[in-house]
Amino acid sequence: MKPDYNILNVVPHGMPMSLLDGIEDYSDKSLVANVTIRKDSMFCEPDGVPAWVGLEYMGQAVAAYAGVKARIANQPVRIGFLVSTRRYESACSHFPVGTSLSVSVNQVTDNTIGLQVFTCRITGKNIEIQANLNVFLPENLEEFYGKT
């Protein structure tokens, strides 16, 4: 189903660091987001956006998944942390201006808090990147940071 959420309402990033354009699809275990590379896209260089930024696209798609899930449950959107990635390899050095990317994330673990694993994929014209992301969603952010 396509949830009717503005990306800024489900990803705990403000502009200009909110990099995704929108959400294409959502299910209980997955989300598909989109981004179109523009000359004014964050991190854009003469050749386009460096492919390493795709890791952040994946991370923000995971955040969007968690945010939509929270909104559906009438919970607040919470901050999570990218812990690590595996096998992020790109055959291209940049995402060229004008390229439309689809960023899909699939939850592998069933945790609602703590360490979670996602398989992620970025696809576009002549682009296919896959990676696993390990993310951490603390139950209580203040306790995690040690604030009382």
Image (cartoon, grey):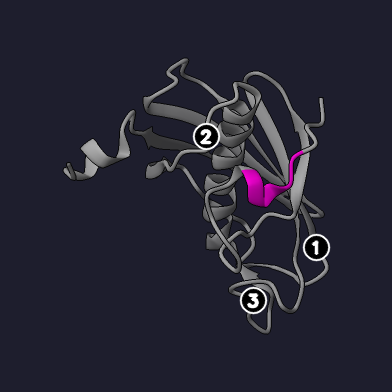
Which of discs 2 and 1 lies nearer the camera? The answer is 2
Q: Secondary structure at mark 2?
A: loop
Q: Earlier in the sequence, mark 3 or mark 2?
A: 3
Magenta range is 5-9
Q: Foreground: 72 or 96?
A: 72
Q: Would you name the residue on which mark 2 appears? A: 76
Whole-Å distance between the Cαs marked 3 and 1?
12 Å
Establish if 138 lies above or below 145: above
- Tell me the residue at 60%/21% (across/down): 73
Q: Earlier in the sequence, mark 3 or mark 1?
A: 3
Q: How many C-alpha atoms fall within 10 Å of the one at disc 1: few (<14), some, or many (≥20)?
A: some
Q: Are marks 3 and 1 in contact (CB under 8 Å)?
A: no
Q: To which quarter of the image does residue 1 belong?
A: top right
Badge 3 is on which residue?
A: 44
Vertical placement of 10 versus 127: above or below?
above
Q: Chief secondary structure of the magenta span?
A: helix
Is 21 left or right of 73, judged from the image as shown? right
Q: Position of residue 4 (x, y in %)?
A: 80, 36
Q: Say the numbered circle drawn on residue 141.
A: none
The amino acid type of the residue labelled 1 equals Thr
Q: Which residue is situated farthest in the front direction here?
A: 148
Q: Residue at x 58, y 74 (%)?
A: 43
Q: The C terminus appears in which quarter of the rendering? A: top left
As for residue 34 lying within the magenta part, the answer is no
Q: Secondary structure at mark 3?
A: loop
The answer for how far apart the CA atoms under marks 2 and 1 are is 33 Å
For disc 1, the marked residue is 99
The residue that appears at 60% across and 66% down in the rendered structure is 15
Percent position of residue 85, x then y: 42, 43
x 42%, y 18%: residue: 111
